[in-house]
Image (tube, grey):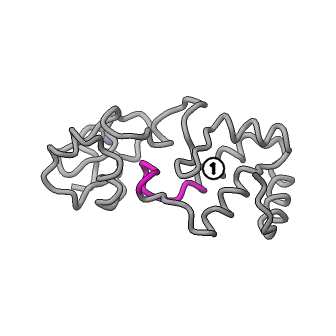
Amino acid sequence: MKLCPRCESKGRTIKPVTLEAQVVPARLDQLGEHDGWRLCTSESCEVVYFRDDEVVVLGETRGVPFHKSEDPQRLVCFCFEHSVADVEADVAENGTSTIQVSIKAECKAGRDDCERKNPQGRCCLGNVGQVVKRAAPDDAAVADAVAEFGYSATPLR
Ligand SMILES: [Zn+2]
């Protein structure tokens, strides 16, 4: 079954390494199979991961997946620990996202660990981009600045 058993939203495949890093040990011990788990893509469903009828819910994982919370204090980048509020404040202060640039540089240098640290099990830059876009008064200016900074090898933080 590829749909969440609670909300029938689509599930997106995750790797065992994500499940093993995210599910709290006491709960992980109860799971028989680590293969074949999926992430529930619904924003409102409490299920984080499911495998057929078996579910892992919010509170049983180390991190809250970005799409399942609206708390500005929640992390959007789990590898380098940037919250949504951090990204918004950065854009407000600098008119561009220096955090987004620094995350890209860290990833390029191979210092990210998204499969383990991000509950979604993949790179956070798509989510960061969403937050930046929402926070920026002028999308075009931010896009230009990011493109420009993107080629800079100088660490910004
Ligand atoms: Zn669900």
Whether residue 39 is situated above or below residue 35 in the rendered picture:
above
Measured from the top left, where is residue 3 in percent x and y?
Answer: 28, 50
Whether residue 30 is situated above or below residue 14 in the rendered picture:
above
Q: Quadrant of ligand 1?
A: top left
Query: What residue is shown at x 63% (from left), y 49% (from top)?
Result: 128
* Prevalent SS, magenta region: loop
Indicate yes or no whether the magenta region holds residue 123: yes
What range is drawn magenta here? 116-125
* Circle 1 Cα neighbour tier, 10 Å, few/some/many (<14 / 14–19 / ≥20): many
Residue at mark 1: 128
Looking at this view, is 103 or 52 the one in front? 103
Measured from the top left, where is residue 117 in percent x and y?
Answer: 45, 51
Tell me the quarter of the picture where residue 23 sits: top left
Looking at this view, is 136 or 4 the one in front? 136
Q: Amino acid at mark 1?
A: Val
Measured from the top left, where is residue 146 in percent x and y?
Answer: 79, 59
Query: What residue is shown at x 84% (from left), y 38% (from top)?
Result: 93
Query: What residue is shown at x 80% (from left), y 58% (from top)?
Result: 143
Whether residue 104 is situated above or below residue 64 in the rendered picture:
below
